[in-house]
Amino acid sequence: MALLHLAEIRPTKLELLTAWLPSRGWYQGDAAAEVVRVAAYRFDDPAGEVGIETLLVRAGAGPVHQVPLTYRGAPLPSADAWLIGTTEHSVLGTRWVYDACADPVYAAALADAVLAGTGQAEEYFEVDGHREVRAPNMEITSDSGRIDVPTVGAVRRVVDGTLTVIVTDTVELTLLRRPDATAGGPPAGVGAATLTGAWDDVTMPLAYASVR
């Protein structure tokens, strides 16, 4: 489960993305347009230290882009190139916001979602000592046979592009930066599987995974 805080965040996540996205080679949109949220889903960090959220966003009339983010209370070592920016969170303090593709916590969570079908984290608020669950605004499903996922350690290599490939010691993951782009299906490998997202009246592949 993912605990959400009733907090102010400055700058906001969308403000960070409005500045950052036009610098990405895979981005298609009006660089002057404000980025707006279309949908989102979260994963759990078993250690409870790292926030993991994937935003589906667009700018103006441009296509939907998928941007996985990790939120950390301290910098991720050797990941400066993947830092989107920092925010001031009124409850948690300074948060370092990363493009999650280089974050091993995200890689492990995505592998579990695609290969083991663990799904998304349930989101909730604590209000006056009571838990209030927030209904998801999209669904994610896997076509995996629910295999045992090997331990995902360090991210060894990231090939950033419209199809961003994340290579770890045990699993290879492919993230669709633009879910409507022609993708061609999951790579060959043990337990090769697809993660699909559905929101409004749209259903599109989001990511692929296979055991190396």
Image (spheres, rainbow, N blue to C red):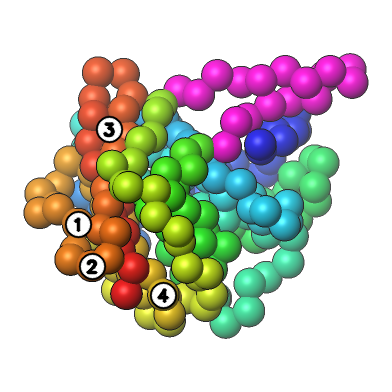
User: Pointer 2 and pointer 4: residues touching (CB < 8 Å)?
Assistant: no
- Crowding at mark 1 (Cα within 10 Å: few <14, some 14-19, many 20+): some
Query: Which stretch did the figure color magenta?
Result: 121-137
Going by the numbered disc 3, the residue's amino acid type is Gly
Residue holding disc 4: 170
**x then y, percent, for residue 47:** 72, 57
Q: CA distance from mark 3 to mark 2?
A: 38 Å
Q: Which residue is mark 1?
A: 186
Real-space CA distance between mark 3 and mark 1, rounded to the nearest whole angstrom: 30 Å
Identify the mark nearer the N-term, 3 or 1. 3
> Of helix, strand and loop, which one carries label 3?
loop
Task: Name the residue located 38 percent from the left edge and 70 percent from the top edge.
Answer: 171
Query: Which residue position is annotated with label 2?
Result: 189
Left or right: residue 120 versus residue 182 is: right
Q: Which residue is mark 3?
A: 60
Please tell me which residue is depicted at 66% across the width and 36% down the height of the picture: 1
User: Residue 111's x, y, as percent?
Assistant: 43, 58
Q: Is residue 107 above or below residue 79?
A: above
Whether residue 178 is visible here, answered yes or no, is: yes
Choose the circle earlier in sequence order: 3 or 2.
3
Residue 117, percent from left and from top: 42, 43
| Label 2 CA crowd tier, 10 Å (few <14, some 14–19, many 20+) | few
Q: In the image, 91: left or right of 168?
A: right
